[in-house]
Image (cartoon, rainbow, N blue to C red):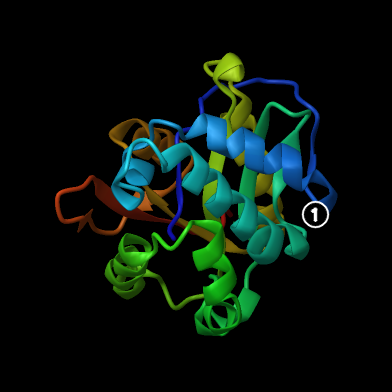
């Protein structure tokens, strides 16, 4: 799976942002499932429209529980928004790499009812674009429909990037829509290429060095 998200931008938003833990699993998976019901990448990965909500919910829940929340870099905003991050250096390449998938392939496949072919294809297409320099990795950031256009996603992004800058760390993600790409550019990310998915959306790998 790859990173995606479409947070909303604002210059000043006062929100209660905290680190998400496994205790927040139900809320995090619910937020992300709702936020990306109509996401073009999710529609490409889970092609069957009828089972898509159920399978995408299983995907978010499994990856949050086993891949992201245990590492203390993800965020939640009072049940309205959530983001899944990995800290720099996680699994040797700042992503859920080979070791993770050897251990969790069967569990993840069960969570998505066996629909893994496009997820595997996606990983293969994205892998050559992943930077080798150390970085924090943003898998996804999403806001419930009722909370969109209020700046919650942008505030979470600012919060995470401030911590990255303080630690002198870069950040990396893959954007899935022109709107989110424009937002990330406003936060200092630059597109390093484009990934054309067969019969699917374009992804933009994006890199942000630490601010000086």
Name the residue rendered at 65%, 31% in the picture. 81
Counting from the top left corner in percent of width and height, residue 118 is at: 31, 61
| Quarter assignment of residue 158 | top right
Q: Does 142 appear above or below 206? A: above
Residue 192 drawn above or below residue 93 = above
Q: Identify which residue is drawn at 56% across, 44% down.
A: 57
Residue indicated by mark 1: 22
Quadrant of the image containing the C terminus: bottom right
Q: Closer to the camera, 54 or 118?
A: 54
At which x and y percent is residue 42?
Answer: 38, 44
- Residue 150 in view (yes/no): no
Instruction: Identify which residue is drawn at 60% across, 59% down.
Output: 63
- Secondary structure of the residue carrying numbered label 1: helix
Tell me where residue 5 appears, x and y as whole percent: 46, 40
79 shown above or below 40: above
In the foreground, 211 or 128:
128
**Closer to the camera in the image, 181 or 102:** 102
| Residue 192 visible to an observer of this rendering | yes
Quarter of the rendering containing residue 131: bottom left
Packing grade of label 1 (10 A; few <14, some 14-19, many >=20) is some
Q: Can you tell which quarter of the image residue 83 is in?
A: top right
Q: Quadrant of the N terminus?
A: bottom left
């Amino acid at each position: 799976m790859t990173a995606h998200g479409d947070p909303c931008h604002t210059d000043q938003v006062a929100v209660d942002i905290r680190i998400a833990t496994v205790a927040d699993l139900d809320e995090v998976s619910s937020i992300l499932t709702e936020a990306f019901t109509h996401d073009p990448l999710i529609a490409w990965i889970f092609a069957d429209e009828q089972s898509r909500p159920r399978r995408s919910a299983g995907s978010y829940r499994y990856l949050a529980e086993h891949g992201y929340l245990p590492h203390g870099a993800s965020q939640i905003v009072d049940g309205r928004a959530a983001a899944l991050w990995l800290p720099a250096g996680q699994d040797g390449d700042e992503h859920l790499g080979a070791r993770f998938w050897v251990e969790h392939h069967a569990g993840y496949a069960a969570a998505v009812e066996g629909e893994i072919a496009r997820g595997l294809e996606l990983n293969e297409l994205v892998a050559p674009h992943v930077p080798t320099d150390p970085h924090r990795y943003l898998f996804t950031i999403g806001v419930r429909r009722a909370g969109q256009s209020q700046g919650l996603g942008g505030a979470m992004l600012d919060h995470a990037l401030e911590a990255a800058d303080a630690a002198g760390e870069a950040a990396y993600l893959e954007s899935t829509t022109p709107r989110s790409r424009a937002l990330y550019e406003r936060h200092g990310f630059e597109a390093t290429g484009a990934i054309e998915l067969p019969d699917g959306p374009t992804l933009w790998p994006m890199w942000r060095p630490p601010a000086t």
